């Protein structure tokens, strides 16, 4: 695995992806993926809740739990030891200290489960996602979506064992969603703390 700068060798073709979106297939081996799936299956995953809406995906958070009723980040348990090696590996690939990845969200998508259009909560800055189990279709559209059109949407097939990063414009100037998955899939998402210089969202 390359340890050069942040995805320096993974620049997409011009215009192919939003600026600040980077993607690496084959970040993990099949055996590494299998070990991580076993860890994830043992976690206390619960249906995600957004105010009065209960989503189909199941999640567990480490390093903070966002309360959508109060729009505040609440304390939660620290990252379990079993996921420290993955955090360290993602951090090396991103060119940051592992401790900078202050929040981790583990999510399970049963067949047919979608994730609607959103930007990640504003308490965090850079986002790094590891995809496990099966392929997912990520969709991106400019934010805010003024008169959104189908042709504005950029699509990315995220393969199992891959890693993606959302930074800069891709993080703040675009929304993303996950199309309903065809088969069981998991994601492990790492986030850095929000930069204090960034104005309120």
Image (tube, grey):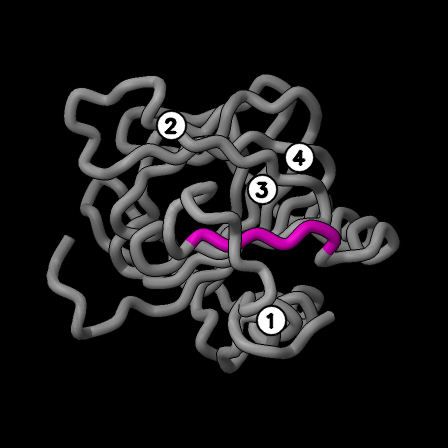
Residue 69, picture quadrant = top left
CA distance separating discs 4 and 2: 23 Å
Can you tell which mark lies on residue 93?
1
Q: Earlier in the sequence, mark 3 or mark 4?
A: 3
User: What kind of element bears circle 4?
Assistant: strand
Residue located beneath label 2 in the image? 153
Contact check, label 2 and label 3, Cβ < 8 Å: no
Q: Earlier in the sequence, mark 3 or mark 1?
A: 3
Can you tell which mark lies on residue 150?
none
Residue located beneath label 3 in the image? 45
Q: Residue furthest front?
A: 14
**Where residue 108 appears, x then y in whole percent?**
60, 37
Is residue 129 shown in magenta?
no
CA distance separating discs 3 and 4: 13 Å
**Image quadrant in which the N terminus is located:** bottom right
Q: Earlier in the sequence, mark 1 or mark 4?
A: 1
**Alpha-carbon neighbours of circle 1 within 10 Å: few (<14), some, or many (≥20)?**
many
Please tell me which residue lies in front, 73 or 126: 126
Q: What residue is rendered at 18% in x and 36% in y? A: 144
Q: Look at discs 2 and 3 and give the one toward the viewer.
A: 2
The magenta segment is 21-26
Residue located beneath label 4 in the image? 185
């Amino acid at each position: 695995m390359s340890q050069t700068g942040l995805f320096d060798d993974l620049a997409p073709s011009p215009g192919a992806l939003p600026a600040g979106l980077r993607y690496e297939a084959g970040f993990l081996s099949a055996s590494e993926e299998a070990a991580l799936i076993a860890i994830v299956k043992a976690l206390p995953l619960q249906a995600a809740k957004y105010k009065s809406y209960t989503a189909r995906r199941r999640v567990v958070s480490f390093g903070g739990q966002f309360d959508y009723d109060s729009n505040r980040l609440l304390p939660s348990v620290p990252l379990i030891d079993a996921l420290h090696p993955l955090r360290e590996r993602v951090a090396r690939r991103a060119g940051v200290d592992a401790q900078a990845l202050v929040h981790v969200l583990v999510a399970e998508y049963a067949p047919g489960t979608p994730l609607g259009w959103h930007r990640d909560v504003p308490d965090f800055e850079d986002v790094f996602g590891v995809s496990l189990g099966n392929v997912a279709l990520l969709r991106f559209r400019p934010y805010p979506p003024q008169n959104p059109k189908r042709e504005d949407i950029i699509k990315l097939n995220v393969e199992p064992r891959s890693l993606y990063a959302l930074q800069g414009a891709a993080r703040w100037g675009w929304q993303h969603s996950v199309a309903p998955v065809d088969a069981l899939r998991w994601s492990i998402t790492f986030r850095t703390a929000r930069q204090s210089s960034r104005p309120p969202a």
